[in-house]
Image (cartoon, rainbow, N blue to C red):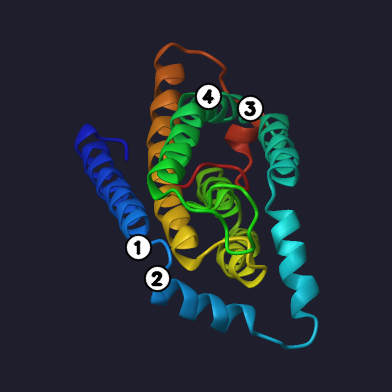
Amino acid sequence: MDSSASSRRWWIVAASVLGLYGVLAVLVRVAPDNVVDRTILRWVSGWDPPFLDDTMEWFSWFTDLRPRLVLALIAVVGIALVGHYRLAAAIAIAVALTAIPINALDSVGGIIAGRIRPNGAPFLAYPSGHVLGTVVQYGIAIYLAFRIGLRRWLRTLVVAVLAIPIMAVGPSRIFTMAHWPSDVVGAYLLGAASLITLVVLLEFAEQWLAKRGLLRDSKRSQSDPSTTPSR
């Protein structure tokens, strides 16, 4: 994503995925109580293996806003402590630039879809905030696992662990009847578009800081092969 041409391609991909998110919101508005949502909801909420109730409830808690904020703060501070000052600052800039637009798209999607949750809670259902936040946060963490150049075995382990909440959060929200399946699909779409945008802006911010000679990384992060960027 270093070249402007590559960035433009990713912007197009993000815009296309965002368009699908908008189309789905309109479809939900037209048919909020549809057979597809109800069939999938009954199927998923009817799963009954041992320990599944507690597992799904735990994932719903773990992917809530407060635990995610704590983990995000720890991650950014950790990146700075190992000497990647510029990358940590770039993350902060990218998040600051995208936080309000992502929340606005979340809210607008809910207003367009205009339906409440299957459990009767008086909140807008579309899209799922848990899924959206999890895709963005753990998706960017997976990107950073490659970006900071972890050793291959450690990177594989980290990516595998980070992928679990991304895959589990959607089914957990359906299983607990907190969201309709289309709410979850919409959140994955918005999350993917937001993640692409966040990564493009992160790299742009890092290049902007580099051109101005701001926040050079420590010598340790530049010389240690376990933290050398791998592109």
Instruction: Please report the residue visible at 60 percent of the width from the left and 36 percent of the height from the top.
Output: 223
The answer to which image quadrant residue 144 occupies is: top right
Which of pointers 1 and 3 lies earlier in the amino acid sequence? 1
Q: Residues within 10 Å of mark 4 (few under 14, many from 20)?
A: few
228 sits left or right of 224 in the view: left
Residue 79, given in percent of the width and then of the height, sits at 66, 35
- Amino acid at circle 2: Asn
Judged by depth in the image, the label closer to the viewer, 2 or 3, is 2
Given the current orientation, which residue lies at the most extreme bottom position?
49
Disc 2 + disc 3, Cβ < 8 Å: no
Judged by depth in the image, the label closer to the viewer, 1 or 3, is 1
Residue pointed to by mark 2: 34
Residue pointed to by mark 1: 31
- Amino acid at circle 4: Ala
Residue 121, given in percent of the width and then of the height, sits at 65, 54
Q: Residues within 10 Å of mark 2 (few under 14, many from 20)?
A: few
SS class, disc 3: helix
In the rendered view, tell whether residue 189 sits above or below residue 177.
above
Residue 186, given in percent of the width and then of the height, sits at 42, 56
- Amino acid at circle 1: Ala
Disc 2 + disc 1, Cβ < 8 Å: yes
- Amino acid at circle 3: Lys
66 sits left or right of 149 in the view: right
